[in-house]
Image (spheres, helix red, strand yellow):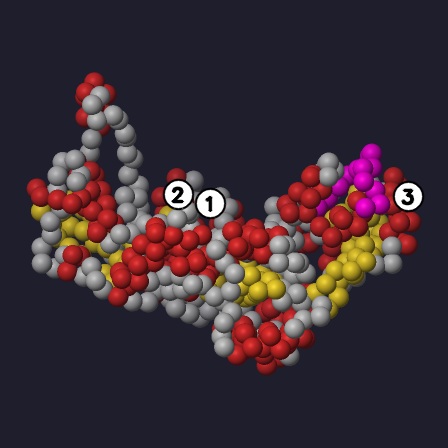
Amino acid sequence: MRSSVAAAATLAALPPGARVGTSSLRRRAFLARARPDAVLVELRGNVPTRVERVQAGDYDAIILAAAGLKRLGLAEHISEYLGVGTWPPAVAQGVVGVCARAGDAATLRWLTPLDDRAARLAVSAERALLRMLEGGCQVPLGALATLDEEQLSLRFKICALDGSGGHERRAPASAATTSAGGAGSRWRTRSDSVSGWRGGPAGARCRGAHRKRARGGRGGRAMNVVLNLKPVVVTRAESSDGPLSRELRSLGLRALLWPAVSVTSADLGPLTAALEAVRSFGWIVFASRHAVAAVLARLPAAPAGVRIAAVGQATAQVLRQRRWPVDLVPEEASAAALIDAFAARWSASDAGVKILYPASSRALPTLAAGLTQLGAQVTQVEAYRTEAAALDVAECRAWIARGGVGAVTFASPSAVTELARALGAEDFQRLLAGAAAVAIGRTTARELTARGHTAVVAESATLQGLARTTHRLLQTRA
């Protein structure tokens, strides 16, 4: 199954620092090897959505399976097919397997005509390689075996997660020595086979990591601890048991609490007055969970006849947990996406509709201005204050000096602004020169870009998405 590039140019023709999206660990490693200058960005969503995000400019290119694009009638978006020699597929990719009980002779008889001998021999060889290298889902390994006139050839590629220490080999083997049942231990190769390389540097690093994960116990968590990934900075205002810290710990990552911002109470007179007249509004728009908390502390039950919009799924979830219905949530958690969602359902009868927008003291004008431009009457009231937090700058600088930070997470533009202010331009630069910046959304990423730093945008604009993206990013850099 070939990989393909969906972009306006081939992979080689992309500009330096191009943003390339893929959700495959194998493709990420191969991309880092082929284009070390490229910025690797997490890619989520169904295939049509991924293609749309390239067209919208979120990515310069994305790497997808060519078969999926063709099956969905999207082949016209393919700018390049990546050769199986340098981009071999995952082991046994594209093969359909049928299982039956070993002693069920009747079922096996029915299945025998379906057996594709060439595919079975090829998959047996690929799986034998996987066992030989003690590989698994966390090893960037690609392999493709082919059978030509009883000569079985196996082409494979393996490298470290950051693309270094790679090895490529094409190993011939006799198809007759591969058992009909696919017993990989009986697969023999010639002198130039993979067995002669098994102790190579990339293989040792990848296999070692996989063995450590296997010894560590459950799931991927043990692998991260054993690999000794550097800690992750949490810049949002939360305790050591806060939601982002918990998500990071569940993935085996240590969280460093550097709260750049704090959330405090506002003068609630305007909010209280607006809520007393809440039935005069057609909509309430929530852009954060803090706004939800401020409103629901004064209005526990959802007001009848007033529709509710949330900027993203995380905010919507908090509302639903309190039994508030949510009428509108954009697919992407951003002010621009919420405005687009309103515009898609806007009609002439909506002109002049009143919208209550409980916001932060530092809320950007994007949302209110966009809704006003549609024809709404927006009442923006301060529901809470976002202020600079008392940060232990000396401790932060000590971590920066010893290069001890693996990644820095930013859940808002304010967190970027305040951390840069607290550390000073020089130390902020030193921090992000050695640690990856991970932003919860594009608005936050743009704040980092304005300061000269490139950020990886979370797979989804939620704290879980922020944690998972950070986890994957640190794995590729380990």
Q: CA distance from mark 3 to mark 2?
A: 53 Å
Q: Position of residue 221 (x, y in %)?
A: 45, 52
Residue in the foreground of this view, choosing between 270 and 237: 237
Picture residue at 40% right of the left edge, 59% below the top: 226
On the question of residue 476 being in view, the answer is: no
Q: CA distance from mark 1 to mark 2?
A: 8 Å
The residue under label 1 is: 47
Residue in the foreground of this view, choosing between 108 and 377: 108
| Prevalent SS, magenta region | loop
Q: Position of residue 229 (x, y in %)?
A: 45, 63
Query: Is 355 on the left-hand or right-hand side of 460?
Result: right
The residue under label 3 is: 277
Q: On the rendered image, what quadrant is the C terminus found in?
A: bottom left
Whichever of callouts 3 and 1 sits on the residue coming sooner in the sequence is: 1
Q: Amino acid at mark 2?
A: Gly
Q: Are marks 1 and 2 in contact (CB under 8 Å)?
A: yes
Q: Position of residue 87 (x, y in %)?
A: 30, 56
